[in-house]
Image (cartoon, rainbow, N blue to C red):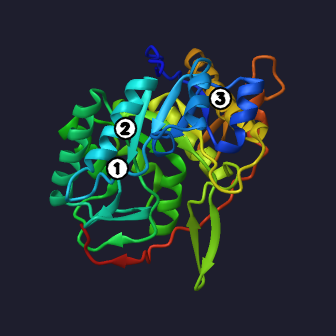
Amino acid sequence: MSKIFPSNPVPTAAGIGLRSQHIGEMLSRRPSAGWLEVHAENYMGGSAAVDALERLRESYPLSIHGVGLSLGSSSGLDRDHLEGMRKLCLRFQPGLVSEHLAWSAADGAYLNDLLPLRYDAQALVIVAANVSRLQDTLQRRVYIENLSAYVAFEGSTMTESEFLAELVRLTGCGLLLDINNVHVSACNLGFEPKNFIDQLPACAIGEIHLAGHAVNEVEGDIVLIDDHGSRVPPPVWSLYAYAIRKIGPRPTLIEWDTDVPALDVLLGEAMWADMLAQSIAFEDHRLAKRPTPQTSRFDGMLLPLRSDSPKGPMPALAALATIKPSVFANHSGARRIGHAL
């Protein structure tokens, strides 16, 4: 008989995405990690991976991340897929459950991709109905993730952030803020990434994702590709710092899906996320005691000028200050396509 785990909240710390090549090492070493996140579809059937996840669930808080429910589908949610998600959540009792603001199925055809929506009132009604059904089925709040964008729809009447804010208002869902996706979309479509974060209801953001991306040149333009195949780059760290200064610390995941490195690399990235969050909290507390400190700016992060002082910043901030952020020009000439959905 399958074990039913007690509820175990995900801590406000950094976790890693559990990948198949790391399962054996995770089981043998049980390294320090704030929490684990798995893709729901990989664990809906009976397999050795499910048994391994049961063993890991005894040691780590868990988040379940769906990639195939197709919340933007006008035909509604697939009944079998939804039931598989319900049983998985009932069995493992994850602290967080999330899905994407995307569609990947139409007329019985399933696409191996997460496709963007047209952001308008009609799409909002469809997505809100699907999110409400998902939350009613799981009997819990679900966190909806923003996408990486490479094109924009001409028929959109609101931005993605405005759409997400309305979705929260209509359904009570939470938000998964993918910082890398915001950066990728902002560079590709030519908008200000901080404005995107500012437009989201901060109280609804329950999880953050961090990842790397590829930089490609297409017909003279720089296009960023969300491939989750490298370390978190400086511009994403900088935007992460802006986000947690604005909304406070959140459970933060390091994603790495292609060219997956050794486990210790992922754990190291998670350590950096924890150190950055703790450093910012430390500095905010110090600035609260000293209303007019002597400071300098580093790409959106407030840094004390005297890092050698015993009362100066935590070592993480001093280390991060040595990183020179990459500069990607925004491209206002975003590719636009016609309507969908």
Identity of the residue drawn at 27% across and 74% down:
154
Check disc 1 and report its element: helix, strand or loop: loop
Q: Label 2 belongs to which residue?
A: 85
Q: Position of residue 285 (x, y in %)?
A: 58, 18
CA gap between label 2 and label 1 equals 9 Å
- Mark 2 and mark 1 residues within 8 Å of each other at the beta carbon: yes
Task: Please indicate, yes or no, whether residue 217 appears anywhere in the rendered image.
Answer: yes
Q: Which mark is residue 274?
A: 3
Q: Position of residue 47 (x, y in %)?
A: 55, 38
Identity of the residue drawn at 21% across and 39% down:
132
Identity of the residue drawn at 30% across and 45% down:
80
Classify the position of the C terminus by image quarter.
Answer: bottom left
Of the image marks 2 and 1, the number of the one nearer the N terminus: 1
CA gap between label 3 and label 2 equals 30 Å
Q: Which kind of residue does numbered mark 3 sit on?
A: Asp
Q: Which mark is residue 309?
A: none
Identity of the residue drawn at 52% across and 34% down:
244
Task: Please indicate, yes or no, whether residue 250 appears anywhere in the rendered image.
Answer: no
In depth, the one of 22 and 237 nearer the eye is 22
- Please state if 269 lies on the left or on the right of 339 as rendered: right
Q: Label 1 belongs to which residue?
A: 69
In depth, the one of 335 and 235 nearer the eye is 335
Check disc 2 and report its element: helix, strand or loop: helix
- Please state if 2 lies on the left or on the right of 115 as rendered: right
- Please state if 335 lies on the left or on the right of 154 as rendered: right
Of the image marks 3 and 1, the number of the one nearer the N terminus: 1
Q: Residue furthest right?
A: 308
Q: Which kind of residue does numbered mark 1 sit on?
A: Leu
Q: Which kind of residue does numbered mark 2 sit on?
A: Met
In depth, the one of 202 and 42 nearer the eye is 42
Q: Position of residue 27 (x, y in %)?
A: 71, 27
